[in-house]
Amino acid sequence: MRDFLELAVSAAASGCVYGLVALAYLLIMRPTGIVNFAVGEWAMLGAFGAYVASSVVQLPYAAGVAAVLLAMVAAGWLTERIAVRPLVERGAPVLAPILALLGMLVVFRESISLMFSPDPYPVPYAFGFGRLELGPLAGSYQSFFIIAVSLVVFAATWLFFERTLAGKCFEAVALNRRAAALMGINLARVTTLSFAAGAAVAGLAGVVAGANISAHYLMGVPLAIQGFTALVVGGVGRVEGALLGGLLLAFAEQLTIRYAPIPAGYAQGVPFLLLMLFLLLRPTGLLSARERSG
Amino acid sequence: MRTSKAIAGLACVLAVALVPAQAQETIKIGVITDKVGPAKPYAEPITQGVEFGAREINAKGGVLGRKIELLIEDDQGKPDVSAAMARKLVDSGAAFILSVSLTPATQQAQTVSLATKTPQMTPSNSGDTLTTQIDNPYFWQTGPLGSIQIATLLSYAGAKNYKRAALVSDNSDLGQLLARFFKSGLEKAGIQVVSEELISRGATSADAQMQKVRAANPDVLVSAGVLTAENVLMLKSYRQLGLKMPLLASYNFSVPVYMSVAKGLLNGVTFVDAYDPAKPEIKAFEAGYKKAMGREPFNLHGYGYDGIHLVADAIRRAGSTDKEKIKSAMQATNYAGIMGAKGMRYKFPAGKRTGFDPNGMVVRLYEGDRQGRVVHVGVGKY
């Protein structure tokens, strides 16, 4: 039981990271319909930003994270201006920006690969390398920190969509772009803000996960795959679905590795199996989006 | 009119005469590296070592009175691209090909060196199968084999009387290959592998794997992983979960990046290496490299440095760039480089094309966060 609860904390932390990446997808996908596979590279940029802020500029942790998030907002805005808006304005089909963003994925990765050596770089922990025991639960400081930060981000995002006018504008665009435009909602601004917010959330995932997995130039694609799987499992339309999908995926991964009587190599196929099962049996994911038209 | 025709004629004669002269000016050595793929962390410093070695050789007058010219190609760690790059290098007139990319890529490039009878060598790949799966008399391997790594670690561990081991690796091609050799080495030594774990590339936690290791209660944990970030993840879980058994690691732990990325986690970890910092040759290499390139080298640079020197040595003894003569000279190599334990020489035993002395590896210990002293040399009875 002790092992199980210890593993539950670790899996919950991993699940929250997947959930944050899934949320980054969702923030962009809901209002625009664009699947941005470069979110993993945004997470990589966040992790490298945290390394630079802590080890090069030597900022305190909170100031470093704030600086990284601001930089990520700028990166998201810039990505939208460079790779998406010119195509949308020319009336390109939705596949065009998806492909352009795949190109941006390569640009981000190779830029980092040129700026830094291919070795992993240390990303700071929020409260150092240590272990916390809360009753029967035990885990690293960083695991508890990741869980707490993710819950705050998901709660804030949920409140934004459900309780604020700006959030309702996003939701309106998600439900019906044309009607939203006719109601005076600025579609371009919503698109820009969705990219900026998506980049910030993905960057945050990179910052908090980077403390464990280190910052390196190949870290983006696995995170993008895990986040996308979490998104499909949880349901592509709901904020809480992203978190749920992330947690389900991480628990499936880690419980399989720990308890399933199968060779170690086979356990890595579990996420893909889960993805295929959901695509076949429940393509809307665990939580379905609200009714969408137009 | 007659004068201008004469000048034009003279120019033609000169041009014709100059072309072969220019072609003979340098000895072209092809290098297949990985600039963007998964082998980049290794291939980049090894290639820099090749470049430094070539620079040093050229500064001393080159080989057979000719300068070495490196033709460097990127295979992205992909076997098919590696073969295409090998073909490109042969077409460009390379007298020799050095492969410093992934083991499977080097394997695939051999199809070209075999077909074109072009000498090819890897100074760094450690897969045991490179010289056994294809009978290619034009290919040699001078990096320390995976089987030598585990034998050296076992020899070090021999006195400790371990009975039960846990083996952890990653899902890279090389990690899998090393895990296979490590497992077979452990079993041959009568050590039971009680837990076999794998950390996938891109994993966000290794807690589940380390929990399994803890539950299996082995005497020793052996790491065959070659992905640095995933090894660091494993190390973090190992410390977090309070595992106390000794950790014996593959040569991947010998790259100095661990000292910064795994700070505070390394004390007591033993790892196998082919680099003895106490050797005078290493001290001279480090000083020369730093002076010429402006930064400190480490063991991976040494593989490349020895690689290009081995090629230059073979061409020198061959007395020409004739590929058949180079092939014969290479097979007769007896050369002391900078890598390996004190006194180690590269040689290819009769019928073999693996040149790293089985007793040439060392075991080193992390003392604090520093890569410390050599605590063991060679494979002993293993």
Image (cartoon, coloured by chain):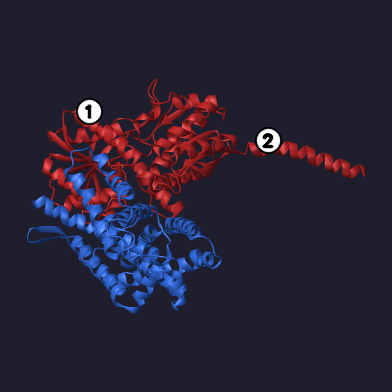
Chain colours: A blue, B red
For marks 2 and 1 on the same chain, the one whose residue lies earlier in the sequence: 2
Residue A260, percent across and down?
Answer: 18, 42
Give the quadrant of the N terminus of chain B: top right
Residue drawn at (54%, 62%), measured in percent from left and top? Answer: A92
Which chain hosts label 2? Answer: B
Of discs 2 and 1, which sits in the foreground?
1
Q: Position of residue B96 (x, y in %)?
A: 52, 34
Residue B122 percent location from the top left of the image: 42, 35
In this rendering, the count of numbered labels is 2
Question: Where does label 1 land, which residue?
Answer: B382
Q: Are marks 2 and 1 in contact (CB under 8 Å)?
A: no
Badge 1 sits on which subunit? B
Q: Residues within 10 Å of mark 2 (few under 14, many from 20)?
A: few
Q: Which is more toward the observer, A10 or B318?
A: A10
Q: Amino acid at mark 2?
A: Pro
The residue at which mark 2 appears reads as B20
Along the line of sight, the residue nearer the viewer: B230 or B6:
B230
Secondary structure of the residue carrying numbered label 2? helix
Displayed quadrant of residue A154: bottom left
Task: Tell me the residue at 26%/61% (across/down).
Answer: A243
| Figure check: B98 above or below A94 | above
Q: CA distance from mark 2 to mark 1?
A: 53 Å
Whether residue B110 is visible to the viewer of this picture, yes or no, is: yes
- Which amino acid type is shown beneath numbered disc 1? Tyr
Looking at the image, residue A163 sits to the left or right of residue A140; the answer is right
Residue A84 in the image: above or below residue B5: below
**As rendered, which of B7 and A215 lies closer to the eye?**
A215
B98 relative to B226 in the view: left or right: right
Residue A186 falls in image quadrant: bottom left
